[in-house]
Amino acid sequence: MRVLIIGVGTRGDVAPYTGLGARLREAGHEVAIAAHDPYAELVTDAGLEYLPLPGDPLTALTGRFSISAFREYSEQLMDGLTQIAEQEADLLLLGMAGAQGYHVAEARGVPSMGVHLQPIDPTGEFPPVMSLFRRSLGRWGNRRAARLAFEVPAAGPMLAGMSAKMRARLGLPPMTPRALYQHRESTRWPVFHGVSPLVLPRPADWRPGLEIAGYWWPLRPRGWQPDPVLRDFLTAGPTPVFVGFGSLAGARAEQYTDLAVQALRRAGLRGVLQTGLRGRLSDDVLAVGDVPHDWLFPRMAAVVHACGSGTTGAGVRAGVPAVAVPVMNDQPFWASRLATLGVAPAAIPFRRLTPARLAAALTTAVTDPAYRQRAQALSVQISAEDGAAPVVEAVNRLRVTRGPGRRTG
């Protein structure tokens, strides 16, 4: 079959699909990933076909929010997804942010499945992970709030209007967000979640078709080798800690770097920083660019990160303590899971982050052996999982029932 993965979002939203796509390719399928241009190399380095999506979500994340900028990005995205409908495909796999691809699949008359990195379907066990709610609203309240997020999206009329335009352009009849949600529920639309059930047990009140599959590990770039400067730094003294703030870091690199350096100095620790700058900042601090987390994290004494889903997975796989500094969206949810699992002290919301608070949390994570012991035990179990297998099995079953797809290229 020819499988098209819609990977809308930033680096952390695209990278897990390279690992999933590689496994599907090994099973005999053709795989293409649609993503924004800054992440094209992630796809091509994995040996997968890249399809461009216009726009860059980083502009909305790292700048001051404006309705006009959001509208422009959303319209570019809708145009790109509409063009995707012209691509040959036997199956669409949709990330959470690429949910509008559901209309594309309908227009092409091909099946689709969700491949989500966040648990957004209604449950009474926790509040909606992409909302402003941080405390439980009770079982009924949690479910109701999550369902409303489906039926009345946060962007409200703007997104509904763009979705209507997209359906009209694809020759489809109108469908409200509520009707779309009800259709997904009634057909038990399958959704696989790329997270370990040890980190997020499957909610007991989820409907059939919603599964916690396990993590999808990004592939290292072909031929990648660590920079000799980084290798020398790692062996030149005590084990350092990692500090990175994900896609947010590029906007205020100097500010975040200065905060991290002050915290490391207070804690008396060496550090590898991924904050937007590069180079040797002092004898004890090295700033790096992109380094595969599966190589770097196991060599750290602790990892400080904003708790995107993929980075959270890389941290628990590495078996090292974490210090969570969540910024937005699903990050506070994953930060709370790390604390509940006992592999991280209490999270520090990014807006409250100071050198003193970060230094104190790092000291706790590094000096209390219980954090490392729990992290190592969790790592052993997670490393034995195969999160891609359930998705590959589902796609293979679909191939059997539908027959082989048309091969192209």
Image: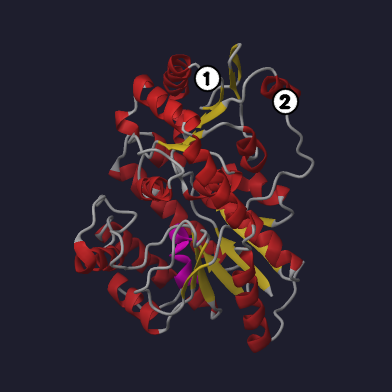
What residue is disc 1 on?
Answer: 269
Disc sitting over residue 139 in the figure: none
Residue drawn at the location 40% of the way across and 35% of the way down: 62
* Residue nearest the observer in this picture, 210 or 55: 210
Is residue 90 visible to us here? Answer: no
Is residue 403 visible to us here? Answer: yes
* Residue nearest the observer in this picture, 65 or 167: 65
Question: Is residue 81 highlighted in magenta?
Answer: no
Task: Name above or below for residue 254 compared with residue 327.
Answer: above
* Residue nearest the observer in this picture, 32 or 330: 330
Check disc 2: other Cα within 10 Å, few if <14, some if 14-19, many if 20+. few
Is residue 130 toward the left or the right of residue 395 in the image? left
* Residue nearest the observer in this picture, 304 or 384: 384
Is residue 303 toward the left or the right of residue 166 in the image? right
Residue 32 sits in quarter = bottom right
Residue drawn at the location 73% of the way across and 31% of the way down: 226
Query: Considering the numbered disc 1 on the image, is that residue within a helix, a strand or a loop?
Result: loop
Amino acid type shown at disc 2: Arg
Residue drawn at the location 59% of the way across and 32% of the way down: 300
Residue drawn at the location 59% of the way across and 74% of the way down: 91
Q: Position of residue 15 (x, y in %)?
A: 59, 50
Residue 150 sits in quarter = bottom left
Coloring basis for residues: secondary structure
Is residue 112 toward the left or the right of residue 329 in the image? right
Which region is colored magenta?
95-104
Residue 3 sits in quarter = bottom right
What residue is disc 2 on?
Answer: 231
